Image (spheres, rainbow, N blue to C red):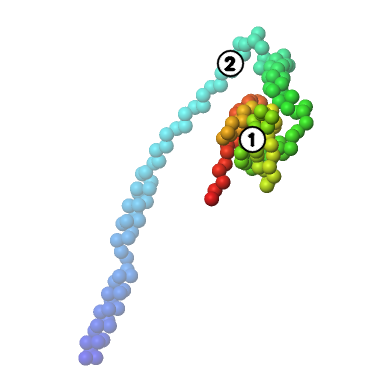
């Protein structure tokens, strides 16, 4: 048994040594070197840059866009528009403010109406106080002037700025609020 074990050890050693010897790896390495030497990259050449051709300015007789004359014309046009817009709000700026102009319309509540000396009047509640409002009174933050009082609503003409900054008139209403039970 000892001889068999000795024989198996020697055969395993020979097999291991045979695996460490020269292999077919050299053939593969030689083939890779040959392929690397034969392969050439194919890169397309870069196209030549376009030639710059300056163009002459042909509008020398036309009005220059950055001239003082063009700027003056634009300023005159803007000032005339501002004057027409300012005419709409100027009277509102010159008069004395009324007490209800200190509050926005959304905090005001129309609670009723009465007729006093033949004229319709609206009853408006603001911060737990009751105010009598007649035609021509002002309400809200946007120069709102009362133009109509009916049984169910008060109609106002407001002066506000639109998205471009121009003053325009718009109609607003304050409607009668029924008390929730």
Work out whether residue 55 or residue 129 is closer to the camera in this orientation and state it: 129
Dot 1 crowding, Cα within 10 Å, few <14, some 14–19, many 20+: some
User: In the rendered image, is residue 4 in sight?
Assistant: yes
Spatial CA distance of label 1 from label 2 is 79 Å
Work out whether residue 16 or residue 152 is closer to the camera in this orientation and state it: 152
Would residue 19 appear left or right of 158 to someone viewing this image?
Answer: left
Question: Is 29 above or below relative to 43?
Answer: below
Which residue is denoted by mark 2 in the rendering? 55
User: In the rendered image, is residue 158 in sight?
Assistant: no
- Residue 40 image point, x, y percent: 39, 41
Quarter of the figure with residue 75: top right
For label 2, the SS is loop
Residue at (30, 78) in percent of width and height: 13
- Residue 156 image point, x, y percent: 63, 30
Question: Is 78 above or below relative to 122?
Answer: above
Which residue is denoted by mark 1 in the rendering? 114
Q: Residue furthest bottom?
A: 1
Q: Quadrant of the N terminus?
A: bottom left
């Amino acid at each position: 048994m000892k001889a068999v074990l000795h024989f198996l050890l020697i055969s395993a050693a020979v097999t291991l040594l045979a695996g460490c010897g020269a292999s077919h790896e050299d053939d593969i390495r030689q083939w890779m070197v040959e392929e690397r030497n034969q392969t050439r990259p194919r890169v397309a050449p870069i196209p030549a840059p376009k030639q710059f051709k300056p163009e002459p300015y042909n509008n020398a007789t036309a009005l220059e866009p950055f001239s003082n004359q063009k700027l003056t014309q634009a300023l005159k046009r803007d000032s005339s528009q501002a004057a027409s817009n300012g005419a709409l709000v100027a009277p509102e700026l010159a008069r004395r403010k009324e007490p209800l102009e200190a509050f926005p319309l959304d905090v005001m509540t129309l609670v009723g109406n009465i007729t006093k000396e033949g004229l319709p009047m609206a009853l408006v509640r603001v911060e737990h106080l009751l105010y009598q409002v007649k035609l021509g009174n002002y309400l809200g933050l946007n120069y709102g002037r009362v133009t109509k009082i009916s049984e169910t609503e008060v109609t106002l003409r407001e002066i506000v700025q639109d998205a471009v900054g121009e003053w325009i008139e718009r109609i607003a209403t304050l409607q009668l609020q029924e008390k929730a039970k």
